[in-house]
Image: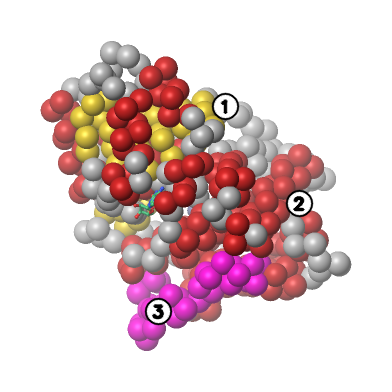
Amino acid sequence: MSHLFAFDYHNPTRIVFGPDSFAQLPALVPADARILLLYGGGSIKKNGVYDGIRAALAGRDIVDFGGVEANPTLATLNLAVDLVKREKIGFVLGVGGGSVSDGAKYVASAALYDGDGWDIVIGKYAPKAALPVGIVLTLAATGSESNAAAVVTNTATLDKRAFYVPPARPQFAVLNPTVMASLPVRQLENGIVDAFVHVCEQYLTYPVGALVQDGYAEAVMKALVRLADTFAEHNETVWQQNLMWAANQALCGIIGVGVPQDWATHRIAVELTALWGIDHGRTLSIIQPALLRDLIEYKREKLEQLGREVFGLTAPSAEDAIAALEAFYRSVNMPLHLRDAGITEPDAADRVLAGLRAHGKMALGGHAAIDEAKTERIVRAAC
Ligand code: NZQ
Ligand code: ZN
């Protein structure tokens, strides 16, 4: 008899959404805190976001740290940790996409730890406290702005790792969709697909009779498919608002409560970014179809449900649903194989497999009992 699992859901991140949301910053950031303004490669200096935040927080004690990379590295974030310790920072304000948001969580936790910050990433040390974090989101994709997850790359070992730091979950997230106007089309495409796959990872397992979670997951996926279908309208306010909220809801935790999850696509896909720097969203569209085809018997019922409820197919097979998924990804210019992303080296699959082996991810297990043989088939089929 299928049923929901027990769960304990608490998402305390306050969301302030709207075109004038920067005006709330003075009330959101503690008045007496010395603030670290953490940001990325400089987009916020070009599109006015930096100036808007500085103006909203005029008179506050702010120290800047820029240069957090897309797919942030341990080395860069540790420079920010040193700055936080030296400057006695009391609040970390991340302004950017998932990379800066994740970086903010790492910095806020590592700043209160005397050991090697990588211990936090690998789970050797579980922080019980972190500096308070707030996020001003500039790219809708990851949901990082209101979850407890972060992803950091150790370039020395090509290890891109996801970890959880509940004490560093942002206290607030400012979602101002107008800041998306400066996003390149490629990042909007990435955002649609990353958010879609986040829902899939919490949905494409097996049915447990979770009417609310399934219904909400399908609503978010249908919204994302609609945004892809209406991509030509991406400069419209309502389009941007919907992507920002859909991406947030896809990974704020609500869809996944009480249901089985399977994050295998993400866990394999990060290796492609670690090796070749491929955008996160694009690594997912490369791995997921191959993974779903290999694990189709484990996921058949939910794939059929996806085809019916999200893609509007009549009596679809699981195979039909995967084909519809691929057409959706192609419609937003996603690669479906590694070669479509320009990686044609003959030993590409071997390199991915070596990375998975080195990082202990050849046998991911889970409901689809992923063993080494399945992982190898999936990776080879994705190349
Ligand atoms: O660095 P800047 O100059 O700001 O430019 C960024 C960056 O080059 C640019 N950008 C962001 N907002 C912009 C903008 N350009 C113009 N206008 C704006 N408004 O976009 C580029 C990509 O930014 P990034 O933050 O890297 O993208 P995304 O939000 O997709 O984040 C990707 C990272 O998040 C991790 C990924 O692995 C990757 O490291 N993830 C985090 C998750 C989480 N914490 O829950 C879940 C995800 O599955 C994901 O793994
Ligand atoms: Zn993702």
**Is 344 part of what is drawn in magenta?**
yes
Q: Which numbered tag is attached to residue 333?
A: none
Q: Which numbered tag is attached to residue 207?
A: 2
Mark positioned earlier in the residue sequence (3 or 1):
1
Mark positioned earlier in the residue sequence (2 or 1):
1
Asked if residue 382 lies left or right of residue 277, the reply is right
| Amino acid, disc 2 | Pro
Callout 3: SS: loop
The secondary structure that most of the magenta stretch takes on is helix
Nearest the viewer among 277 and 138 is 138
Nearest the viewer among 261 and 363 is 261
Q: Nearer the viewer, mark 2 or mark 1?
A: 1
Instruction: Name the spot of residue 30 as percent of width and height, x first.
Output: 35, 16
Magenta-highlighted residues: 325-354
Q: Quadrant of residue 125?
A: top left
Residue at mark 3: 342
How packed is label 1: few (under 14 Cα within 10 Å), some, or many (20 or more)? few
Q: Which numbered tag is attached to residue 10?
A: 1
Image point (57%, 45%), residue name? 237
Callout 1: SS: loop
